[in-house]
Structure formats: C-alpha cells, structure tokens
Image (cartoon, rainbow, N blue to C red):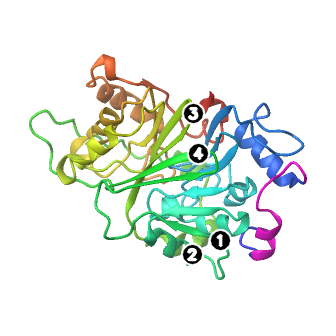
Amino acid sequence: MIGAGTALAAGRLQASAAQADPRTVAARVRFFGTDVVDPDTGAVRADRVVLSWVGCTTYAFALAGSVFLLDAWVPRLTSTGYVPATAQDLADLAPEAIFIGHGHFDHAADAGRIAEASGAVVYGTAEHGVNIRAQVADPTFRTVALGDGASLPGERHEFTVGPVEVTAVRHVHSARTAPERPGGSAPFFPLPELGALVRHPPTLAGVLQSAPRLGDPEGGTLLYQFRVPGFALVWHDSSGPLTEKAPQVFDDFADLAPTDVQIGAIQGFNQISNGLRDPRRYIEAIRPALFVPSHHDNWLPGLTASAATYDIPLRGELSRIPTDHRPNLRTLHDPADYVNPRRLTFPL
C-alpha cells in the first residue's frame, strides 16, 4: 500500500529496461496508452507527449521519455470513485518529478505519500516542500524550493529535469475582486450538480485521508512551462486577478517561449464577479496554439459542477480574443475524460 515508506521507495524508483515493475508497466499503459509504453520495460516513447487527467488540475505527464505529475491529488473527499484512479495508481507510474502549482489540499494532498512511494522529486515553493514533507512520518524524498513566501509575482526560476527545460513563474491565486467596469466579463457560477454525490458517495477512508489536509495553506502559486525541441507546454492550476494585483506578470508570461499547449484553471473565486476574465487574460498573454481548460470538474458536488457547464461561457470568453490570436480549444469533460490519454496526445 502507498505510504509503506523507504522499503517501497527503494525498490521502485524508476522502471528500466533491465527490470520493470509490473505495476509500473500496467499503470503507464493505462495512463499513457498501449502505443506509447513498452509492454516489457515500461519505457515511454520519447517522440510522444501525453497527458492524462486525474481530476481537478492533476495530470500524469509523459514528455520526451520522462514521466511527471502535475499536482498530486486524486479527488475523493465527497465523491469517492468519481475519478477512476487512486493515489497508489499515481505512485505506480514511478514519476521522476512532481510539480506543485500551489499547496491547497485539492492540488497537493497526496504529494508526500506519492513521492515517498515512488522516489519522485517534488518541485514547488519552500512552503510547499515543508508542508508536503509533513504529510509522511519519515520522508525519504527530495524537495526543490522555487522561491518562498517572500517571492514577488513575476519571480522566475529556470532549471532542467532530465531532457526537459522548465520555467516556473510566480503568479497569484484566484481571488474575488470588484467587477471590472467598463468592459468586464459577465459573472458566472453554475448551479451545483449533486448526481455525482448520489452515484459516488463519500467513504470513511476518503474522508479520513482528506480531512487532515483541508487546512493546508496555498504557500505561493506557480505557473510552469515545460520545453523540449519542437514542443512547449504551459500548465497552471489557478488563474488569479493579475489585472488588479500584479499586471506586470502578463509581460512575464508574454516573454515565455512560444507555447503549443496551455492547460489552465478556469474555475476560480473571481468567476462570481468577473466570470472567466482571468483565465482569458492568461491566454491572451501566453498565446498558445491550443488551450485546454482545467479545474472545472464536479469533484465537489454542491460547490462545483460538471465541466460541460463551462463550455458555452468559455467559448464566449474566448470569442473576445482577436481571431488571429485566439487558440484552438480542446475541452475535457468529466467523468468521461478522466484517465483518457487519447484526448491529450501529441507527436514530437
């Protein structure tokens, strides 16, 4: 079981051609596809980019032969089983690294146990590292601090992980601000949908695992760009009101290398006042060829709704971007697109 500690971590750091853990092979085939993973070694094809959505803003990510996690939490607080995956499944992937966007429970609550079980290095702010290491009794994994509580929006970190160049940019978490006038976006908040709660009721184990992490602090918010020759991906698990709080960060986003795919949070606290303005402004600055919405699924019935309810307002918001700068849109709908690598597979 996940959380078993050093013995499990020592035996399962990475799949290799010499000795592949059958659980790692099976997990990688499931999350990345039979045509991407070697059935004997578990190695992933270096000429493919694959992302597999695991709820909220967590993704299993294969890039240039490396395996990563973007955030590290499988939703199960109120609707256990709505996402057809577990934290153990993510550990079985044997990721090399876990990248944390911010430290709230719905983004990082499983990071410590997954890192301990897999040996993955955890990247995030110093505060993220402290809180994630505290999730397990005797952490054996390494954390890398990308700034700390004193970091200002726009602070930039450049580093490499294997063959992948990474840029991390400090930005701000979603927050409600006064309606922008003139020219603001219409407020939006979908009606809660309780069907998932009926079909997937909470379990005692899910509640007990999640409850201790509910108060985890944000610890700073990071946007990441991942680059290999011929491809660049931007991922951010929150879209903040930079317009009011740190407008200079839009210039930092614009200075990033040209982006092929942007996966960005569209659900946020400011949608009550400013609709989907904040995610649109991120898109306008980053100018991706393809935009994929995230953090918009019904993992917390009563407060959230299905991703499909965002389709019309999101398309309306994107229509405000001039045609020559407007990205293509690839929607993800829960629960059909959970652990569905066919939706986000790209050639290199």
User: Residue 91: horizontal and vertical position, in percent?
Assistant: 71, 59
- The Cα–Cα distance between marks 3 and 1, rounded to whole angstroms, is 29 Å
What kind of residue is marked 1?
A: Phe
Asked if marks 3 and 2 touch (Cβ < 8 Å), the reply is no
> Please, is residue 43 above or below residue 313 in the view?
below
Estimate the spatial distance between the alpha carbons at disc 1 and disc 4, rounded to whole Å: 20 Å
Residue 274 position, x and y percent, is 22, 42
Residue 129: numbered disc: none
Please report whichever mark, 1 or 4, sits nearer to the chain's N-terminal start.
1
Work out how far the residue at label 1 is from the one at label 2, CA to CA, in angstroms. 8 Å
Please check the rendered image and state whether residue 270 is part of the magenta-colored stretch, yes or no. Answer: no
Number of other residues with Cα within 10 Å of mark 3, as a class: few under 14, some 14 to 19, many 20 or more: few
CB contact under 8 Å: marks 1 and 2:
yes
Q: Which residue is mark 2?
A: 133
Whole-angstrom CA distance, mark 4 to mark 3, is 9 Å
Image quarter hosting the N terminus: bottom right
Residue at the (57%, 63%) spot, across then down: 122
Which residues are the magenta region?
A: 6-18
In x, y percent, where is residue 320?
25, 25
Q: How many marks?
A: 4
In the rendered image, the vertical position of residue 251 relative to residue 217, given as above or below: above
- Would you name the residue on which mark 3 appears? 229
Residue 164 has which mark? Answer: 4
Return the disc, 4 or 3, that comes first in the chain's sequence. Answer: 4
| Relative to 67, 190 lies left or right | left
Instruction: Describe the element under mark 4 as helix, strand or loop.
Output: strand
